[in-house]
Amino acid sequence: MTAPEDRPARIHALIAAELRGADGSGDRLRQLCRFAVRELPASGAGVSLITDAGTQGMAAASDPTSEVVEELQFTLGEGPCIDAHASRRPVLIPDLAEDALTRWPAYVPAAREQGVQAVFAFPLQIGAARLGTLDVYRDEVGALSGEALDQALTCAEVALMILLDEQDRAGPERMGAVAESALGHRVELYQAQGMVQVQLGVSAAEAMVRLRAHAYANGHRLGDVARDVVTRRLSFERDTP
């Protein structure tokens, strides 16, 4: 049995092997999420970014369902990711039905519709810098063991290191550019955001809210809505949900 003090080193070594050959921060974050699902008692995992510059959104996820659950928090404006980032502390919810309905009345039923029964959010932070969260999902009720918590915290540490590595490449004054790099696979979403901003005459933040709200109200993935906007199959008007 691995001694408790050796666990972080062992997990770091396993993650390093998993990420070998990954191309770019987005790919490394996705591989990290998939690693977390295999190593933890988890059904899904995701990394979301929240920066002081206002950039926020799902950066990577282990699978399509986890992408949806990550985005729900930004669509609805509530959830464990947002609370973990704001409080600078892990948010550990072993039973969404019992422990969180009054806390997140919109998020809980929406997440449970996706099969999520428990969620654990770990802030990505160092000093005063807060970059987002690593979120771990379970499709059954139950807390994480002490060993599993250590593994999750190590995964969060690696996610932070990936983002800081991007920051080193971009320069210390360009955290917004770092976020955009990590969200690089979502270029289409930002194109759609700009188009909706022009169509409705609203701010960029409001345009993103409208995109997310439209996706949620119609049961579509955010990426699919963005693609429809960019290809002009969907045009937002003042009365678009």
Image: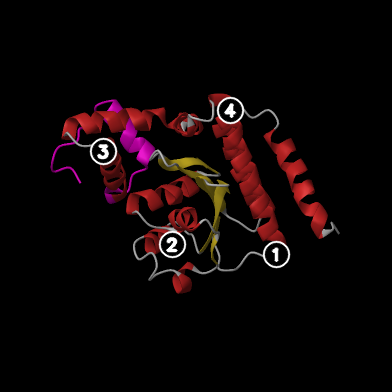
Q: Amino acid at mark 2?
A: Arg
Identify residue type, mark 1. Gly
Q: Name the element at disc 2.
A: helix
Q: CA distance from mark 3 to mark 4?
A: 28 Å
Asked if residue 12 lies left or right of residue 166, the reply is right
Instruction: Tell me which numbered mark, 2 or 1, is placed earlier along the sequence.
Output: 2
Q: Would you name the residue on which mark 3 appears?
A: 207
Q: Tell me which label, 4 or 2, sits earlier in the chain.
A: 4
Mark pair 4, 1: CA separation: 31 Å
Q: Is residue 28 left or right of residue 15?
A: left
Task: Say if 144 sits above or below 152 in the image.
Answer: below
The residue indicated by pointer 1 is 146
The mark nearer the N terminus, 3 or 4, is 4
Q: Secondary structure under badge 3? A: helix
- Left or right of 188: which side holds 119? right
Q: Under tag 4, what secondary structure?
A: helix
Q: Is residue 179 magenta?
A: no
Asked whether residue 227 is drawn in magenta, I would say yes
Please give the label number shown on residue 112: 2
